[in-house]
Amino acid sequence: MLVHYRKDYQKIAMGLLSLLPELRDEQRFNDELNWALTAGESVYLWKDQEDNHFIAVVILKVGDDYVLLRRLSFTPSERSGHNVYALLTAIHEQYPDRRLMGTLDTQPLITSWGKANE
């Protein structure tokens, strides 16, 4: 389930962002979250339906006709295709009139998800 970021989720979001190799440094993932929030990016947490824990964070840039998946980080035990696809489907349902796009890092996931949903 997609849950919109709130200030009281800050430690959870930063912990999930710290799992990305390029954001391992504390200052770096802190800066990434702060930048996303001040730039007006949409930050969501993904809650596991079964045990009700947050297992992912996603940062989106929402345009008039697109949604750009900028960052995506899952806990190591939850990085299965099923979880990733469920999250991408939820984003697509949240923004049904916009095209889901990715960065160089996230586009392969979106392409794979798109082929699975054809």
Image (cartoon, rainbow, N blue to C red):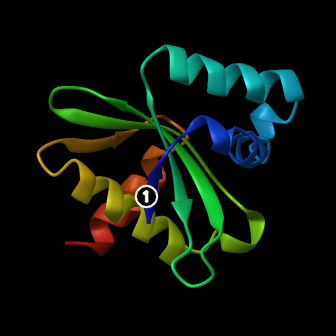
User: Where residue 29 sits: x, y (%)?
Assistant: 75, 29
Task: Examine the image and state in which quarter residue 113 appears.
Answer: bottom left
Provide the residue designation for mark 1.
Answer: 2
Location of residue 92 with respect to 18 vertically, above or below = below
User: Which quadrant of the rendered structure holds the N terminus?
Assistant: bottom left
User: Where residue 77 sits: x, y (%)?
Assistant: 75, 73
Location of residue 64 with respect to 83 vertically, above or below = above
Q: Nearer the viewer, residue 57 or 66?
A: 57
Location of residue 77 with respect to 109 vertically, above or below = below
Could you say whether the residue bearing mark 1 is in a helix, strand or loop? strand
Q: Residue at x 60, y 75 (%)?
A: 52
Q: Nearer the viewer, residue 3 or 25?
A: 3
The amino acid on which the numbered mark 1 sits, given as a three-letter code, is Leu
Find the residue positioned furthest to the left: 97
User: Which quadrant of the rendered structure holds the C terminus?
Assistant: bottom left
Q: Residue at x 88, y 29 (%)?
A: 25
Q: Nearer the viewer, residue 34 or 113?
A: 34
Q: Residue at x 64, y 63 (%)?
A: 55
Q: Describe residue 49's horizontal placement relative to residue 117 as left or right.
A: right
User: Where residue 111 sits: x, y (%)?
Assistant: 36, 56
Q: Describe residue 114's horizontal placement relative to residue 3 as left or right.
A: left
Q: Nearer the viewer, residue 12 or 64?
A: 12
Q: Describe residue 49's horizontal placement relative to residue 93 as left or right.
A: right
Find the residue positioned furthest to the right: 25
Task: Examine the image and state in which quarter residue 40 appears.
Answer: top left
User: Where residue 48 sits: x, y (%)?
Assistant: 56, 73
